[in-house]
Image (cartoon, coloured by chain):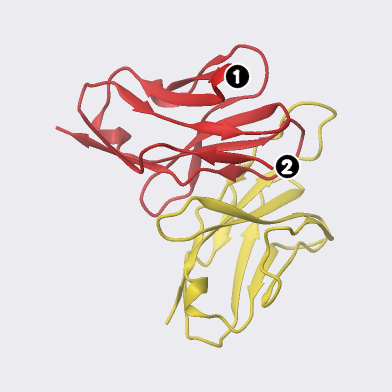
Chain colours: A yellow, B red
Amino acid sequence: NAGVMQNPRHLVRRRGQEARLRCSPMKGHSHVYWYRQLPEEGLKFMVYLQKENIIDESGMPKERFSAEFPKEGPSILRIQQVVRGDSAAYFCASSPPERTSGYNEQFFGPGTRLTVL
Amino acid sequence: AQSVTQLGSHVSVSEGALVLLRCNYSSSVPPYLFWYVQYPNQGLQLLLKYTTGATLVKGINGFEAEFKKSETSFHLTKPSAHMSDAAEYFCAVSENSGNTPLVFGKGTRLSVIA
């Protein structure tokens, strides 16, 4: 059973370009979370999505960042007009459908390391 | 709002010595608590978690942690450090419900000296 997959693993962009990060959740998982890890920092929550719905985007920067999780295909985190401060590791996690009680563990992908030149 | 404080951004121990990584949390609701390990250029791997029940939880690789509500702590321990334990360790908290985002501490880098 494949784990959470993210691609690309490394991405280099010049200032002003667009970055697209992809996340394929584990089989059977319908919830996706995106987190950002800045250098020397812990992971910070960005957005939580279910299929075709954004559930919580309270951690997303108001401009240039967007996320989607379509009915078919991977979840996409899109960063427009990247700046040097966007350089970070972006992690995706997935969890199974809602349970009536208890905790649904989040399984993390290997991350995409974005470098903005 | 929830928050996590990890005391010590870097901890160094000798091989075979006790490992103690400290974590204190703040939460207005009963928390779920987690420890994750991150090896260089890799994703996060769950070491252990506390959800309900027994407050002393055992995880993988010989690690364990104890939930102390009165101290709002969830410190991670291992009796005897191994070279392979060298990594970054993150404590995290979430609300006591099914699908909620995790709030992470800043991490503690563990070095193991031969």
The vertical placement of B112 against A74, above or below, is above
The vertical placement of A43 against A115, above or below, is above
At which x and y percent is residue A67?
A: 72, 67
**Residue identified by numbered label 1:** B69
Amino acid type for the residue under numbered disc 1? Lys
Find the residue positioned furthest to the top.
B54
**Residue identified by numbered label 2:** B100
Amino acid type for the residue under numbered disc 2? Thr
At which x and y percent is residue B50?
A: 60, 23
> Visible in this render: residue A2?
no
CA gap between label 2 and label 1 equals 21 Å
Q: Residue at x 73, y 63 (%)?
A: A73
Report whether B16 appears left or right of A20: left
Residue A9, disc: none
Q: Residue at x 42, y 82 (%)?
A: A117
Find the residue positioned furthest to the left.
B114
Q: Earlier in the sequence, mark 2 or mark 1?
A: 1
Could you say which is closer to the camera, residue B4 or residue B90? B4
Task: Using a 10 Å C-alpha cutoff, classify the residue at mark 1 as few (fewer than 14 neighbours), some (14 to 19) or many (20 or more).
Answer: few
